[in-house]
Image (tube, grey):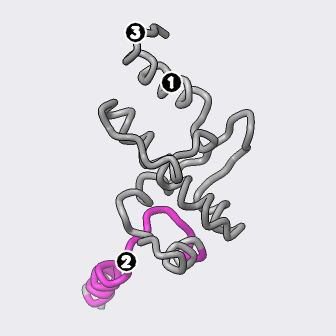
Amino acid sequence: MRSILLAFVFVTAAIIPSYADVTPATAAFLKEIGIDPASPDVTLAADDVVSNKDIQNVSLNSLAAMRDQEGVKRFIATRAFIHRYKADTKTPFPSESLYDVIYLTKPEQDFVFCQYASGFGVKC
């Protein structure tokens, strides 16, 4: 009986898609607006919570709960970008219509600015 239960758990886990750490409601909203909840960008942004001088405790789940389509798209693009940019500063910026510094923490904003400015000889 125990082995049947374990087999059921493994088969169920293989069948049910993994949607990073987004709530079921967020996953449904993402699908509704044409975003794959299991995409690499969503996976990168799923656990992020951003606070800075303009916003407090904003996450993918909180934006989806407000049904903020543009906010969700910008949050995902900006957060996925910053994760990649920290690893490789040659990572291209997302389009202006998606990149939004409001979804960066102050240290991340400073890091991006210094990296960009260093290309013009500015030292931070």
Residue at the image point whose x is 38% and y is 36% from the top: 85
In the rendered view, does 73 fall on the left or right side of 117? right
* Crowd around label 3: few <14 · some 14–19 · many ≥20 (10 Å): few
Tell me the CA gap for discs 2 and 1.
Answer: 38 Å
Q: Where is residue 84 in the image (x, y as percent from the top left)?
A: 36, 41
Region in magenta: 4-25
* Crowd around label 1: few <14 · some 14–19 · many ≥20 (10 Å): few
Magenta-span inclusion, residue 102 = no
Amino acid at circle 2: Pro
Instruction: Say if 115 sits above or below 77 in the image.
Output: above
Which circle marks residue 17 in the picture? Answer: 2
Element under label 2? loop
Q: Position of residue 40 (x, y in %)?
A: 35, 59
Which circle marks residue 62 in the picture? Answer: none
Report the mark closest to the observer, 3 or 2: 3
Residue at the image point whose x is 45% and y is 10% from the top: 122
In the rendered view, does 89 fall on the left or right side of 52? left
Amino acid at circle 3: Gly
Which of the marked residues, 3 or 2, is nearer the chain's N terminus? Answer: 2
Circle 1 is placed at which residue position? 113
Tell me the CA gap for discs 1 and 3.
Answer: 12 Å
Magenta-span inclusion, residue 5 = yes
Circle 3 is placed at which residue position? 121
In the rendered view, does 40 fall on the left or right side of 45? left
Residue at the image point whose x is 58% and y is 39% from the top: 101
